[in-house]
Image (spheres, helix red, strand yellow):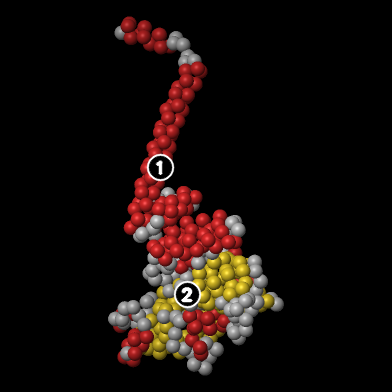
Amino acid sequence: MEKHNSVFELLKHRNTTDWHVYMWLFVGMLLVLTLLYLGYKWRLKSQQRHNRERGFKILERLGTEKGLSFEDEVKLAHIAEVTKLKNPGLLLDSVAVFDKAVATWMRQAMMLPWLKMEDEVAWLKKIRKQIDFRYLPENVAPTTTRELPRGGKVFAIVSFEDTLQLLVATVLGLDDLSLYLSPFRQADQELVRLRSRHDLWCFFWSSRGGEYRFESQILKVYTIAEPLLLVAHGDHLHHDLDHSMFTCEVDIDVKIALASAGQVDVVPPGAKVFEDEAVLKTLSVHINALSSMWFRFDFVEGVGKEDLVRIQATGTELEFMSGEMGQVIRSGGRSIFCRFFDFTEAKREQLLHFLVDGISVETFQERLRQKPR
């Protein structure tokens, strides 16, 4: 016990730890953490370098399989390097990746003299044809305007004397420089003359994703022979499946033919659903909102989610929509939402002209400022 007491006495009178000790402990711990962090960064860089080297080998292999020349492979590798692709092999394996890389590459190419830039565009056109990278499959939603098909419609909105006007043009062709559009036309088919460098908000519709909008500019106007517009690509598309820029409040009473989801066996749904009169019910509804992709009517008993409806609007201002079909996407509360399907471009254009007349310039500008959800 006496021995223990002597130890306790020594502990009572021990010297306090010098501050230098704490400082060196802190420095040592900081050094260990720094070494661990540097080791992690070195390992990450090594892994990324290894992946890029493997990606370039995949790019070379795919280029050989697709019959590209050595010069073409070298140039594609340079594009992958300049655009900082993490996996260069995807450049020849994915249309979407190729489009994004080319969009970045073309920003630099557009700084070149016009003739040299046209050489770059011609080379890209040759590569796209050789590797069959012109359009995305129909089941894939578009990511840029570089996948728009020929003959498709592009819509533009301009303000004139405090009112909105809808302009329509047809896609005549495209390359990696621009879209080649016919001159824009008004609802009465009158041509609208727009100058070069005119900024535009443009829209197009995809059967896969609905409404897409993009900011663009007229690069060049050709008036010799057949009029032609060169319009800059939209590489950043704004898209929201359930919210359309073309939406307005309406007050229209119509009739709808209703086919309950439980009684419909046709997949995908279409006009054949409404050929069987035995499964149809006719209801009078009040449409209170209308857009380019959906319409909304006051709640009615007996209408459920995924039910199919067909508009019967004879004798109303929506008579041109008679026969159009939709599917209930939301039912409950005070309103029922239906999304259009099997919509033709001609019918959509007619609907857009109707909707634009009910939207003010201020409302439209406010919607442009809102970010897609």
Three-letter code, disc 1: Arg
Q: Nearer the viewer, residue 46 or 292?
A: 46
At a point 47% along the width and 14% down the height, the residue shown is 16
Residue occupying the far right of the picture? 161
**Element at badge 2?**
loop
Q: Earlier in the sequence, mark 1 or mark 2?
A: 1
* Residue located at (58% from left, 75% from top): 228
Query: In the image, is residue 92 above or below residue 33?
Result: below
Task: In the rendered structure, find residue 26 and report the number of the disc placed on it.
Answer: none
Decide if residue 106 is on the left or right side of residue 339: right
Estimate how packed mark 2 is, as few (under 14), some (14 to 19) or many (20 or more) residues with alpha carbons within 10 Å: some
> Residue 275: x percent and y percent?
34, 90
**Mark 1 lies on residue:** 49
- Rendered residue at 42%/71% (across/down): 208
Number of marks drawn: 2
Residue lying furthest bottom: 315
Instruction: Name the outermost residue toward the left.
Output: 265
